[in-house]
């Protein structure tokens, strides 16, 4: 039980007017209470730092305590003097922590009651180890949450980009690390090798995690479309106190990084400042400069790989063209050989057929002609025999007839003559019919031979025409395919050469600019060295009024011992030289 409670119990309340009239003033009462409060010893108290306001004269703080339901059950105001605050702040910042509203602390409190300023507490110390334990506990809690959710390795397991085309950068505005990053990134942008989209977000405020998460969400949505997809996200800070990293120890921020659909790169401190974000990022780097250097080297390697791939494409394309040319040449040779053989066989077949048909047709014509000639000769001979027999009969009969029968003889002669004429007419008609029959037979034989030869000639001509058509079409089709393949390969090779040449040219220009900048720095350093060397030149030293002492060999004397040991000393001054001898040998007599 406290002393104040004991005092209240030993002096019970009363309504006696006499007692009320003997009461003391407020200041006296508060002084008595202050004396009682002062006797209460200082104690280490676990609470939450609810408010903090640093000033030169007094650092004001407010501490609260909440129950398991988050309801506030106690509150007190106070603070500490500047010297105490400076010591506490330096301890926390040296450990990489930052005292801020909402921190769980173990604070040493001393109660104070002043008649004018009222009751307050004075902070004499804050336990650093308790704060470190709370920070580690928060970090371990976030790790466990991410592991239980199965997303601890999600971003780390994404494949690293083989090239960088578009990169999002989240960084505080005006940060020194951002300037180092942009000095290299701007050169990549001017060369057309990469594009950088910057999100300026403060890292040292209470809402820093929420604002970084909002930026990550915008990037996540933009990556859903291929034309706006980012290759990576860089979270960089660079410079500043290590205590500022405590703002980034946030569960929602860590979860957002793990769930990003593109690799996350971190460069938010130095080597000693490795934190939770470095553990879950796909590409952790120490500083912003290392982040942009990783991007630059990856782009350079991709360009070199592209150049090697271009050479490989050219070589492979040349091999394919050579193989196709060889195959086409062989195909043309085989087609020509087969076509010539086919034509030769067709011509041989036609000749054999024609040769086989011609002897039979000629024999038939000869036989027919002989038969017609024989028939004509037999007819003429029979007609002549008939006429000769009739004339003989008439002469014989006429010689034995009487004169009275001459008229009858004449009539008979006329009848015989008419019969002879009729016989000759019939003979002539028969000869004409035989001649017509021979001509008809000749025409029939000719038609038969032509009808037998024509299909062979037509078939052979059609076959030859089709063979020639195919022979003409095959090389043309093959030539067209080869031409199209050549054109396609040439277009692809030319496009690859052009793109790679442009990229190599840009890299070469960038290398030349860097070399010029380095040369300019070297020239500046050489100029400074020359100025310093000119200032130390003996001519300059003498012009400034100094004297150079030399020995007989002309070597400069740099100490009193060397001067005493020299037999003869030459003093070189601005307006001439003179010789001196040592006083230890011949006195101080100048020459």
Image: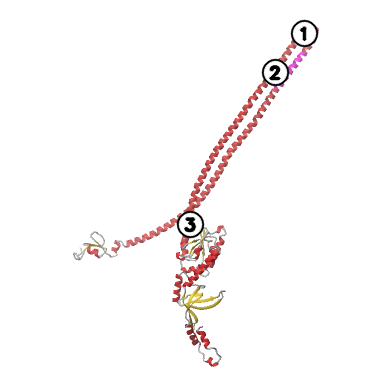
Residue 255 visible here: no
Count the marks: 3
Q: Is residue 120 above or below residue 476?
A: below
Q: Residues within 10 Å of mark 1 (few under 14, many from 20)?
A: some
What segment is highlighted magenta in the picture?
Answer: 415-435
Residue corresponding to mark 1: 398
Q: Earlier in the sequence, mark 3 or mark 1?
A: 3
**Which marked residue is nearer to the observer: mark 3 or mark 1?**
3
**Which marked residue is nearer to the observer: mark 2 or mark 3?**
3
Residue corresponding to mark 3: 298
Q: CA distance from mark 3 to mark 1?
A: 146 Å
Check residue 245 for magenta coloring: no
Residue 166 visible here: yes
Q: Is residue 157 above or below residue 74?
A: above
Question: Residue 289 location in percent, x, y?
Answer: 46, 62
Residue corresponding to mark 2: 376
Q: Is residue 526 above or below residue 385?
A: below
Q: Secondary structure at mark 3?
A: helix
Q: Earlier in the sequence, mark 2 or mark 3?
A: 3
As drawn, which residue projects farthest toward the front? 1
Q: Residue at x 79, y 8 (%)?
A: 406
Q: Residues within 10 Å of mark 3 (few under 14, many from 20)?
A: some
Front residue of 42/589: it is 42
């Amino acid at each position: 039980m406290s002393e104040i409670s004991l005092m209240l119990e030993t002096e019970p309340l009363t309504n006696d007017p006499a007692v009320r009239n003997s009461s003391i003033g407020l200041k006296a009462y508060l002084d008595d209470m202050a004396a009682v409060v002062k006797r209460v010893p200082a104690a280490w108290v676990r609470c939450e730092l609810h408010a903090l306001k640093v000033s030169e004269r007094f650092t004001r703080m407010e501490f609260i305590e909440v129950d398991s339901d988050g309801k506030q059950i106690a509150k007190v105001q106070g603070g500490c003097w500047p010297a105490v605050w400076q010591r506490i702040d330096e301890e926390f910042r040296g450990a990489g922590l930052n005292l801020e509203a909402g921190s769980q602390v173990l604070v040493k409190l001393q109660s104070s009651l002043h008649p004018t300023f009222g009751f307050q507490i004075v902070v004499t110390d804050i336990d650093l180890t308790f704060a470190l334990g709370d920070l580690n506990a928060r970090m371990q809690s976030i790790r466990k949450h991410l592991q239980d959710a199965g997303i601890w390795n999600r971003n780390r397991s994404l494949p690293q980009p083989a090239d960088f085309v578009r990169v999002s950068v989240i960084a505080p505005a005006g940060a020194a690390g951002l300037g180092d990053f942009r000095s290299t990134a701007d050169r990549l942008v001017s060369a057309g090798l990469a594009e950088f989209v910057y999100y300026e977000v403060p890292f040292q405020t209470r809402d820093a995690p929420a604002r970084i998460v909002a930026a990550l969400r915008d990037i996540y949505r933009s990556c859903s479309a291929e034309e706006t997809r980012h290759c990576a996200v860089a979270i960089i800070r660079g410079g500043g106190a290590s205590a500022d990293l405590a703002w980034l120890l946030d569960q929602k921020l860590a979860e957002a990084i793990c769930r990003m659909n593109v690799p996350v790169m971190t460069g938010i401190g130095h080597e000693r400042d490795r934190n939770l974000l470095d553990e879950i990022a796909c590409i952790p780097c120490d500083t912003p400069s290392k982040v942009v250097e990783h991007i630059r080297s990856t782009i350079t390697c991709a360009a070199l790989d592209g150049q090697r791939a271009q050479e490989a494409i050219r070589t492979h394309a040349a091999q394919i063209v050579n193989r196709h040319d060889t195959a086409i040449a062989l195909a043309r040779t085989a087609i020509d050989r087969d076509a010539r053989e086919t034509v030769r066989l067709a011509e041989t077949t036609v000749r054999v057929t024609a040769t086989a048909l011609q002897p039979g047709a000629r024999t038939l014509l000869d036989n027919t002609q002989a038969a017609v000639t024989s028939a004509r000769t037999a007819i003429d001979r029979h007609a002549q025999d008939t006429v000769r027999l009739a004339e003989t009969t008439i002469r014989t009969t006429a010689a034995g007839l009487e004169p009275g029968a001459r008229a009858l003889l004449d009539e008979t002669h006329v009848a015989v003559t008419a019969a002879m004429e009729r016989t000759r007419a019939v003979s002539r008609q028969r000869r004409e019919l035989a001649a017509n029959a021979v001509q008809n037979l000749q025409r029939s034989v000719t038609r038969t031979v032509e009808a037998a030869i024509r299909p062979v000639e037509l078939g052979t001509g059609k076959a030859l025409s089709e063979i020639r058509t195919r022979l003409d079409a095959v090389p043309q089709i093959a030539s067209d395919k080869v031409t199209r393949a050549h054109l396609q390969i040439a277009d692809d090779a030319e496009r690859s050469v052009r793109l790679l040449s442009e990229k190599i040219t840009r890299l070469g220009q960038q290398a030349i600019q860097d070399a010029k900048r380095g040369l300019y720095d070297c020239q500046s350093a050489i100029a400074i060295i020359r100025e310093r060397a000119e200032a130390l030149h003996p001519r300059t030293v003498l012009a400034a009024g100094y004297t150079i002492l030399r020995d007989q060999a002309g070597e400069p004397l740099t100490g009193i011992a060397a001067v005493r040991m020299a037999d003869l000393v030459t003093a070189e001054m601005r307006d001439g030289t003179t010789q001196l001898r040592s006083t230890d040998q011949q006195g101080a007599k100048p020459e």
